[in-house]
Image: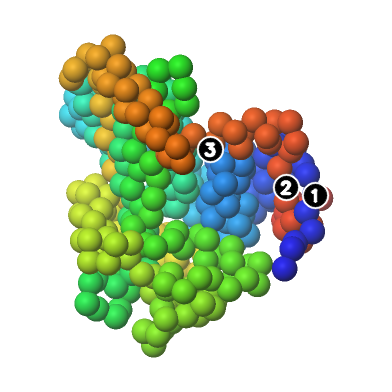
Amino acid sequence: MTLATILLDQKELELLVSRALENAGAGITAARSTARALVQAEVDGQSGHGLSRIDSYCAQARTGKVDGAATPSVRRSRPGVVMIDVAHGFFYPAAELAAPVIAAAARDCGIAAAGFYNSHHAGALGLAIERFASGGLMAMMFANTPKAMAAWGGRAALFGTNPIAFAAPVPDAAPIIIDLALSEVARGKILKASQDGQPIPEGWAKDADGNPTTDPTAALKGTLEPIGGAKGAALSLMVEMLAAALVGANLSKDASSFFDGDGPPPDVGQLLIVFDPNAFGGAANVAERIAAIATAMTEDEGVRIPGSARAARRAEADVRGIAVSTALLAKLRTLAGA
């Protein structure tokens, strides 16, 4: 089924999303930061972390499950460690506030780790760490999310999709961005399929009874399959310890859903690690080696460097605009009170 769409300018769409969030009770700073992130995810092809989230974000702001007026705080607990209290608010304004402090700590110490707690959905992690790669640093990030996957061999949801991401600068090119959930698919893609009334592929999920399903609604009530079988399940456990246990956040099994306004704040966590190449092999040497990797990859026909499609999508959006379904646009306008 093809959905009817309309093209909107990126800034126009950001303003509409921001007004929807403000109308739900979010402060201007949080609303604008969150709107930028959601729209950019949509542009980058990460629709599961894009506009499909606006309805649930607004619902959570209205009920107080997320504090749209929260004031995050940032402190360096050690020279190379930054702790960010998201204060039960949206992740994006906290990440923007903390970014300069984290980058400074990385340049001071060679490496810096940042822990986010009392946090919320971090969206497309690649966006959160791209800013560091654009500044010549390397970064990796781990995030725990509400329970969606069983431990290997089990049936009950215990771990989140627990995404991981990595970003590195490439000389005279867009950064390399690796961003993936540890489930076969990010849960946001299943949410979008449910909203669009589309089935999901086999192998993505099981229903609440442990049976494979192509019904996205049943999948949202069941469990997701880990990427790579037992290996993905083990990595999800690793992320749970780094992004939740280490930073003092809720475990996935205790975090409330990102998809509705019911219950307490999810209070999940994220761990971000940033490296200054100058403290290791030296910026020039590191850049030379990264460039060599990128060149070797592109010389092999059919190989695409992770993150390279973003630049093309962004250029297209600048010229053509962003395609939004008429149904979603109507909902956005209702939420914005337009």
Instruction: Determine the residue positioned at 32% across, 41% down.
Output: 141
Dot 3 falls on a residue whose secondary structure is helix
Alpha carbons under labels 2 and 3: distance apart: 17 Å
Q: Which quadrant, please, contains the N terminus?
A: bottom right
In front of the other: label 1 or label 3?
3
Three-letter amino acid code of the residue under disc 1: Ile
Q: Position of residue 183 (x, y in %)?
A: 37, 62
Dot 2 falls on a residue whose secondary structure is strand
Q: Earlier in the sequence, mark 1 or mark 3?
A: 1
Q: Position of residue 97 (x, y in %)?
A: 43, 30
Q: Identify the image quadrant of residue 156.
A: bottom left
Three-letter amino acid code of the residue under disc 3: Ala
Three-letter amino acid code of the residue under disc 2: Ala
Res. 113 in view: yes
Q: Is residue 298 left or right of residue 240?
A: right
Q: Earlier in the sequence, mark 2 or mark 1?
A: 1
Instruction: Determine the residue positioned at 38% across, 55% down.
Output: 181
Dot label at residue 6:
1
Q: Which residue is mark 3?
A: 309
Instruction: Determine the residue positioned at 21% across, 26% down.
Output: 111
Alpha carbons under labels 2 and 1: distance apart: 5 Å
Q: Residues within 10 Å of mark 2 (few under 14, many from 20)?
A: some
Q: Position of residue 93 (x, y in %)?
A: 49, 37
Q: Which residue is mark 2?
A: 323
55 up-or-down from 175: above or below:
below
